[in-house]
Amino acid sequence: MLGQAEAPPGVQLDVSLTVRDARSDEVVAGPYTCKGLMFTDFALKHSCGPADLEPPRGGPYVVAETWRYTARPLLPAGSARGPEFSW
């Protein structure tokens, strides 16, 4: 699994990837965290991973990516979720 983030220059993020149960939102694998991703004029995009997260077989899952700004505590954290899948 591979997460991606894009931000303007000067932003620094911690990005985490998890696999979550699609029904309960419980984390079933991960997190895999990439700390201190620094965005510059020459690096507006960063990848987090690849990560080998192995959820148990069964149930429907979603991959979630969360991020928080490390150098700007007043900015809110964020998240994104992928489509539901079965494993």
Image (tube, rainbow, N blue to C red):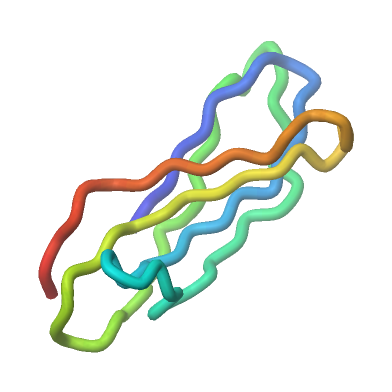
Q: Nearer the viewer, residue 23 or 75?
A: 23
Residue that protrudes farthest toward the front in the picture: 24
Q: Position of residue 47 (x, y in %)?
A: 49, 42
| Left or right: where 79 falls relative to 28 | right
Q: Residue at x 52, y 33 (%)?
A: 5
Q: Position of residue 56 (x, y in %)?
A: 25, 87
Quadrant in which residue 20 is drawn: bottom left
Report the number of discs: 0
Q: Nearer the viewer, residue 40 or 16?
A: 16
Q: Quadrant of the C terminus?
A: bottom left
Q: Residue at x 60, y 61 (%)?
A: 33
| Left or right: where 64 falls relative to 76 | left
Q: Position of residue 27 (x, y in %)?
A: 45, 74
Q: Residue at x 37, y 74 (%)?
A: 53
Q: Quadrant of the N terminus?
A: bottom left
Residue that protrudes farthest toward the bottom in the picture: 56
| Left or right: where 18 falls relative to 57 | right
Q: Nearer the viewer, residue 37 or 71?
A: 71
Considering only vertical position in the picture, is 40 above or below 27? above
Q: Residue at x 72, y 19 (%)?
A: 40
Q: Position of residue 80 (x, y in %)?
A: 43, 41
